Image: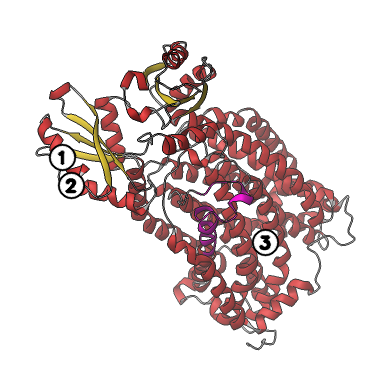
């Protein structure tokens, strides 16, 4: 099938390139408009959860209570000086009235929480006009320049929920531009060194550029169907660029290998039958892995799933259509402008990878034991993970919105925006509500319970009670307190919904925990089926899943050591919060499982190819490692350059994703793919290729094979002794 596709593309190469050129122009013009269509909110909340219902009911019945904008003032005089009040109120009065719906200050509320200990600092809370986040951000853009224009010798800093979102969104756009400026030149240099020539090196990079614009276009289409988080642009950009360059490297390397011994049409057909087949299987496997994100409730994860799947298919289609057409046009000229006599990837000598492969074949028990022990040791810190939310601390330490948030927590008693909130509905009995509030205030760890909103005066039937507490909002103690608050019986005839930042994390964990087994079942079953159809074995898919689980465990352990515990925080320029948002390991799990399978499929494809030729498992595994070791390592290096550029992001959880993926790819391309997988396959022997009779017949009829010829029955290479 794939060889016929290669011949079809070769005959129609100019038409394929013409259509691709038109699509590229369209993507450059329309696809880049995605930046104005993405959802500005992070999408980390769990729709339909108790905390989500609490927020919705409170907003419906009591009005919005969010601190959209917080303006932090400081001066040489105290808030008791009339000039201080005059300066602040004059600055607020100058703001456009149609953009600000309400303003709260120390002088309008009399609340002590608005003043710091030395009484030289205070803040104002503004609520903005707008029905949704996008409209409130427009209101903020209209007033932000005037927020810091204050007289009387005062200084002003701006923070709050909307200001934080805008700061994060702006930083995301800057990070993408900087990452591309860093990675693309480095990628070109590395590709030239890997291929030994400029023409061959430019092809994967060209597919990478096509993938970036294609991912933008796919995301733009998706914004018309569903909300897509602003952070999807970062993830899909580096995923698309990395996969496209991987696929380009595989395809170009194989074509250069084939063009030396065949004419152009046959070389392209052989390339598509081998590397093209591998790219197709890999692309579908990665997409299946990302499809698990669609089962989660959080908009962030679902939008990453939609965007990631679309991006993978853009990469795969580009590698299977545009790249073969370019190779067909170039033919032997793919080796033009080379500075090596022999193109990379065509050598048959044993080399370093061959010696390593035979060393693993001779000592599989030693290699398997050592690598498994190392991976488990790296993964051990993951057992101590602490979960938390996403707030202003994801910004750099000097970001104004973060400075304001930290000042509220440290200098203003009760100024934190992280209370636990109990929203009582269905009763107008103030005495019963007060008694309920007293019971909440008596819970261990609660330092105060105050009514912060009620409708209809004494006859209202919705009341919001805010609980102050001593624990860190991201701690186990705070999450335990949320559960204990929910266990307190509500007033007679009333309903209570408990919300707030910590309750949101509790609900995220519950939702993720309930969904994750189904995701594992879906992705595991689909991956098993795909790898069976590709390789005709029921053992290899199970082995691949176990290998990936070990690789992921090691990665998550390193992520906890760095981003939760703060190791290397100075070098990587971030502030550890002692917690990790639940959505981030899930996102990394989906992407890394797919990328690990990418390398697994490429290695196993070569091993299966050699096994069909020789019938010897040991010889096939050794040859597979020898033939793919340099290419997989090169692909991993290129992917690391792409992701490493995004690891410079000023947004902590994007940096964490980038660093985590760098660690995962290093571990996977070296320890797992070069050592553990071949050792395991050597120990399994011919059992690697076993399938029950009915499944073997199914593979014979429907398998995704390079050739219909049956494999030889007997090995033709001598066995290698096990040590």
The label shown at residue 274 is 3
- Tell me the element at label 3: helix
Q: Which residue is mark 2?
A: 488
Mark 3 burial class by Cα count in 10 Å: few <14, some 14-19, many 20+: many
State which quadrant residue 43 falls in: top left
Q: Earlier in the sequence, mark 3 or mark 1?
A: 3
Residue contact between numbered discs 3 and 1, judged by CB atoms under 8 Å: no
- Give x and y (percent) for residue 693: 46, 76
As drawn, is 455 to the left or to the right of 218? left
Residue 666 on the magenta span: no
Residue 557 on the magenta span: yes
- Magenta stretch in the rendered image: 554-576
The label shown at residue 323 is none
Q: Which residue is mark 1?
A: 436
**On screen, residue 274 above or below 157:** below
Q: Earlier in the sequence, mark 3 or mark 2?
A: 3
């Amino acid at each position: 099938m794939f060889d016929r596709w290669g011949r079809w593309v070769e005959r129609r190469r100019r038409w394929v390139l013409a259509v691709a050129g038109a699509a590229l122009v369209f993507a450059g013009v329309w696809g880049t408009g995605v930046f104005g269509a993405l959802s500005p909110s992070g999408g980390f909340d769990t729709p339909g959860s108790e905390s989500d219902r609490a927020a919705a009911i409170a907003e419906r019945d009591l009005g919005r209570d969010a601190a959209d904008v917080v303006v932090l003032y400081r001066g040489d005089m105290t808030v008791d000086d009339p000039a201080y009040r005059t300066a602040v109120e004059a600055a607020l009065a100058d703001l456009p009235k149609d953009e600000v719906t309400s303003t709260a200050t120390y002088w309008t509320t009399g609340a002590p929480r608005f003043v710091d200990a030395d009484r030289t600092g205070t803040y104002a809370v503004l609520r903005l006009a707008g029905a949704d986040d996008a409209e409130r951000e427009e209101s903020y853009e209209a007033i932000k320049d005037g927020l810091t224009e204050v007289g009387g010798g005062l200084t002003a800093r701006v923070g709050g929920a909307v200001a934080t979102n805008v700061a994060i969104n702006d930083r995301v756009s800057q990070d993408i531009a900087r990452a591309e400026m860093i990675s693309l030149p480095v990628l070109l240099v590395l590709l030239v060194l890997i291929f030994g020539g400029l023409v061959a090196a430019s092809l994967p990079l060209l597919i990478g550029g096509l993938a970036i614009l294609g991912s933008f276009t796919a995301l733009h289409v998706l914004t018309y169907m569903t909300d897509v988080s602003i952070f999807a642009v970062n993830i899909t950009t580096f995923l698309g660029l990395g996969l496209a360059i991987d696929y380009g490297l595989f395809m170009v390397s194989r074509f250069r290998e084939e063009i030396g011994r065949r004419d152009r049409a046959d070389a392209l057909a052989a390339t598509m039958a081998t590397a093209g087949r591998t790219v197709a299987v890999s692309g579908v496997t990665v997409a299946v892995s990302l499809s698990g994100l669609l089962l989660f409730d959080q908009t962030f994860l679902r939008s990453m799933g939609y965007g990631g799947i679309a991006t993978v298919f853009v990469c795969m289609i580009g590698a299977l259509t545009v790249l073969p057409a370019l190779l067909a046009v170039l033919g032997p000229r793919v080796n033009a402008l080379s500075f090596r006599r022999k193109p990379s990837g065509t050598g048959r000598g044993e080399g370093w990878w061959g010696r390593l492969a035979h060393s693993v074949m001779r000592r599989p028990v030693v290699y398997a034991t050592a690598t498994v022990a190392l991976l488990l040791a790296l993964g051990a810190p993951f057992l101590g993970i602490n979960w938390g939310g996403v707030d202003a601390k994801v910004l750099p330490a000097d970001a104004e919105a973060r400075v304001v948030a930290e000042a509220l927590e440290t200098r203003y008693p009760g100024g934190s925006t992280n209370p636990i909130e109990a929203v009582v509905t269905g009763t107008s009995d103030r005495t019963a509500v007060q008694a309920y509030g007293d019971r909440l205030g008596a819970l261990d760890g609660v330092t105060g319970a105050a009514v912060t909103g009620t409708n209809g005066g004494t006859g209202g039937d919705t009341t919001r009670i805010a609980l102050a507490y001593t624990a860190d909002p991201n701690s186990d103690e705070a999450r335990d307190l949320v559960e204990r608050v929910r266990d307190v019986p509500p007033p007679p005839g009333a309903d209570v919904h408990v919300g707030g930042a910590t309750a949101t994390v509790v609900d995220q964990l519950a939702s993720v925990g309930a969904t994750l087994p189904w995701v594992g079942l879906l992705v595991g079953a689909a991956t098993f089926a795909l790898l069976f159809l590709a390789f005709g074995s029921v053992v290899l898919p199970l082995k691949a899943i176990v290998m990936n689980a070990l690789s992921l465990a090691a990665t998550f352990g390193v992520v906890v050591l760095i981003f939760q515990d703060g190791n290397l925080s100075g070098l990587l320029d971030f502030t550890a919060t002692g917690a990790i948002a639940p959505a981030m390991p899930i996102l990394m799990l989906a992407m890394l499982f797919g990328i690990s399978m990418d390398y697994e499929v490429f290695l196993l494809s070569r091993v299966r190819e050699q096994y069909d030729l020789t019938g010897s498992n040991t010889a096939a595994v050794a040859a597979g490692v020898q033939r793919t070791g340099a290419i997989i390592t090169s692909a991993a290096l290129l992917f690391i350059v792409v992701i490493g550029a995004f690891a410079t992001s000023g947004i902590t959880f994007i940096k964490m994703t980038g660093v985590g993926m760098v660690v995962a790819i290093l571990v996977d391309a070296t320890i797992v793919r070069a050592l553990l997988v071949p050792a395991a396959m050597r120990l399994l022997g011919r059992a690697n290729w076993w399938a029950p009779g009915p499944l073997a017949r199914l593979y014979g009829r429907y398998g995704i094979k390079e050739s219909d010829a049956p494999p030889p029955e007997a090995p033709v290479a001598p066995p290698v002794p096990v040590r």
